[in-house]
Every structure is written in structure tokens, then in C-alpha cells.
Image (tube, rainbow, N blue to C red):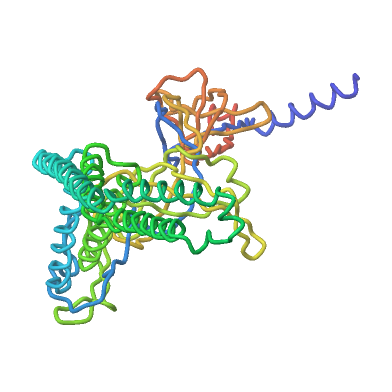
Amino acid sequence: MKKKRFFILLVIVGLLSAGIVAVTSAQATTDTAAVETGKVTQATLSSVVESSGSASPVAEVTLAFGASGTIDRVNVAIGDRVKAGDVLAELDTSDLELTVAQAEQSYLSQQAAYSMTLTPDANEVTSAQLALSNASANYKLAQQKYKVNSTDSVSLSCDGIDSAKQAYDDAVTAYNNYISNWRVQVNGTAEISSQKAQLDRASASYDQAVASCNLTKSGINTSGVTSAYASLVQAKANLDSLLNPSERTLAAAKIKLDQAQLSLELAREALDEAQIVAPFDGVVTALTAVVGGSGGSATLAVMDDSQYHVDVLIDETEISQVQAGQSATITFDALPDVTVTGSIGRVDPSGTVSNGVVNYQVRVNLDPTDAALRTDMTANVSIVIDTHANVMAVPGTAIRTDTTGYYINVVGADGTAQRVDVTTGYTDGELTEMSGDVQLGATVYLGELTTTTTTQQRGLNLFGLRIGG
């Protein structure tokens, strides 16, 4: 130990003898002049899934005539705005209009007939009642005539039956008395007697009287009574049919009415099909119909551009975050200054595989906008998955990290960097959520700060009395 101390003393003595003592010092400085700065702000941060597609209108249809014929009028041109129900083009409809008029008349006639079947006309009921009364009177008169005529004829033809019967009975008695004499039986004169001859004549007269009577009765004409009765039955049926129509009658009348109505509807439908009518408000995008041309091959396209949608493909790794109702923002390559909002309308349940990659189609419905959108414009869609509202945030490049954790460099009053430890949270790629002992509006350094170390030497000249480097 003593030897070491002695050596040190010798060195000092040597320096002193040279007349010079040199002193060296080092100093570290932080260069902040070239580092950009940012602010601690309050912001709303969103996580998004991005994709792109083409703008499509809410509806676009190609229309055609439903009937054949010659085109009579074309009322629009490509680019024209139309309203729902506007007649855009029509065929020559003169024949169809005549068919409709005829069908209308037939329908009105059947409608009146059906109405009268349900509730008969008072005049018809009165006429039917009068017809029944007349038929009843005619029937009674026919009966009376028949009775009078038949009684007189039968009386004339059948009056002789009684006298012929009496003569026959008397002849039978006389003959029986004659043949009861024993002498007549012995002599055998009964068959040639006058009594037998009288009996034969009486029997023949009686048979003839009966036959004549029966012939008269059978020959009496009843056609007048029969005809009058048939008229009476028909008159009763007619009146009853008016007042109490049967279910069958009502059904038949209803069938005729329905048939007439169907014919009218078909005629009107044929007339409607001779026109092309706008199904919704929109703009005409295509037109091949020309006046005088054939309606069979003519077409006309209308687009509803009141709202657009964009169909995009989302990778299977992100689709689980996407669901109907989520909001979205849309930009367009052709309209760099336009941003449109929208929402998810639907997510297809099945995906498509292309080159081994699975994607799912998602429809984004755009909110109404005045932007000059056109069909098939390239649209860039950002679907908002999650949102952190009103959080303290700094640009992401302001966040630094070391072995102790995350921190930011706050610009002090003198321009120096002051380290503030922070806890980070959500990031949207530009701003990062954070919390720590820092105020809103504070300025922070965005880049990596560089530290420079400088070395200085100072000497003492004891003999020359010079002090300094």
C-alpha cells in the first residue's frame, strides 16, 4: 500500500514539475429540433374491416310488352326520369279497347241478371202473379167445359142401358118360366121357342147399349183440361222461381257472372300488356322500342337510383366480426372528395372458395346521398367493427416502449422531453388510446429522440498562472 501511494505522489510531482495539470469532462445532450410533434387529443376510435366492390342501384329491371303488335308510341328516351305508373311505350290498342268495351257490356248484363235473381224486379213479379191468376182461371174454365161436354155425351149414349137391361131381365124370366114346363123338356122345343128368340134379342140389345156407353166415355176429349193444368203448373213454377230461387238457379247465375267478370279481366289484362309501365321512380337506362316496330322484341330498362348498395367479399378470418346493422363508410375512386355512410344489410351464410381462399359476400346499403354516384363505380368500404368514443389519444408514433413499459415524450416548457408513463388501449391505425399523467392538448414528440454526448478538456498551468482548456 505504501508503495502505491508513493507512486501516485511521484506522478503528481511530475505533472507539477512540468507546470501543467489537464482536466477532462463529458456532457450528454438531447436533440429535439428535427423531431415532429403532435397533440394529446380526445377522439373516437373505430376498428374497421375493409373491402371493395362496385356500386349497384337498389333495383334495375328490363321491361317488355306482354302482347304482340305494332308499337304506336314511345314516350321516353334514355336518361329520362320517370315516375311509378308512367306509360313509357304502348302498342296500337284499338282492337283491344273494343274487346274490353264488349266484355264490360257483357259483365254489366250478367251482373244485372244475377242481381235480379237475388231480388226479382217488382214488375216481373207482378207479371208472374197475373200469369198465374190467368192460368188458374183457364184451368177452371177447362174443367167446367169438360164436365158439361162429358155429361151430355154420356147421358145421351148411356140412357138406353137401363131399359135394355130391364128388357133383358124380362126375357130371361120368360124363358126360364117356359123351360120349366115338363112338356117343353120332353118335347125339346126350348131352343126354337119364341121365348128363346126374345131372350137372344134382349141380350144383344143390352150388350150393344153397354158398348155404346163405354165407347162414348172413352172418346171424351180431355186435352183442354190437360193443357190448362200444364199452364197452371208452369205459372206457379215461374212465380216461385222469382220469389224463391233455388240454390241451383243462384249457382248458375253466379257462374255466368263470374265468367263474364273473368272475360272482362282478361280483356283488360291484354290491354294493359300492350303498355310498358314504369314499376318505380327511376331513370331510363336502355331502350330498343321504336314507333312502328314490332312489340315482340322491344325492351326498355329502368333503374331505381334512389339508393345504392355495394356487395363486397370479406375474408373468413374477419367475417365473424361482421353482422347486419353495423355502420360503414364508403369512398369512391371516381369521387375522391366524397364519403358516404351506410350499414350492413345482409351477410351471406355460405361462402365462395377461390384459389383456396374462402370469402363471404356482404351487402352494404348506402344511405341516401346527393353525390353523383353511378352504377358500377368502384367503391371502397370500411365496416366499423368496434368504436371507442371520447378517449384520450395520441398519434401512434408518439408511443414509445422500453423494459419498464409504454411511455410518451411530452414537450416541456423549455422544449425538453419529459417522459410520461402511459397505459395504451385501442388503436385505429393512426391514433392510439392511452391514459396517464398528461393533459389534453399537451404536445408530444412523435419520433425517436437522439442523445449526443460531448467531451471537453480543461488544463491548469500553475507556473504560468493559466487556468482553462
Image quadrant assignment for residue 355: bottom right
In this image, 305 relative to 208: left or right?
Answer: left
Q: Position of residue 317 (x, y in %)?
A: 63, 47
Quadrant of the rendering where the N terminus is positioned: top right
Residue 185: in sight, yes or no? yes
Total marks in image: 0
8 or 39: which is nearer to us? 39
Kindly indicate the quadrant of the structure image that contains residue 119: top left
Estimate the x, y position of residue 316 in percent, counting from the top left. 62, 50
The image quadrant where one finds the C terminus is top right
- 281 or 188, nearer to the observer: 188
Q: Nearer the viewer, residue 294 or 57?
A: 294
Residue 165: x %, y % from top left: 37, 48
Up-down relation of residue 394 to residue 109 (above or below): above
Closer-to-camera residue (213/382):
213
Determine the residue located farthest toward the left in the rendered image: 123
Q: Residue at x 70, y 31 (%)?
A: 15
Q: Residue 295, relative to residue 13: is it above or below?
A: below
Please indicate whether residue 332 sits to the left or right of residue 456 in the image.
left
Residue 124 to residue 465: above or below: below
* Residue displayed at 26% across by 37% down: 244
Residue sitting at x 55%, y 37%: 451
Q: Hey, which residue is sitting farthest bottom in the picture?
A: 293
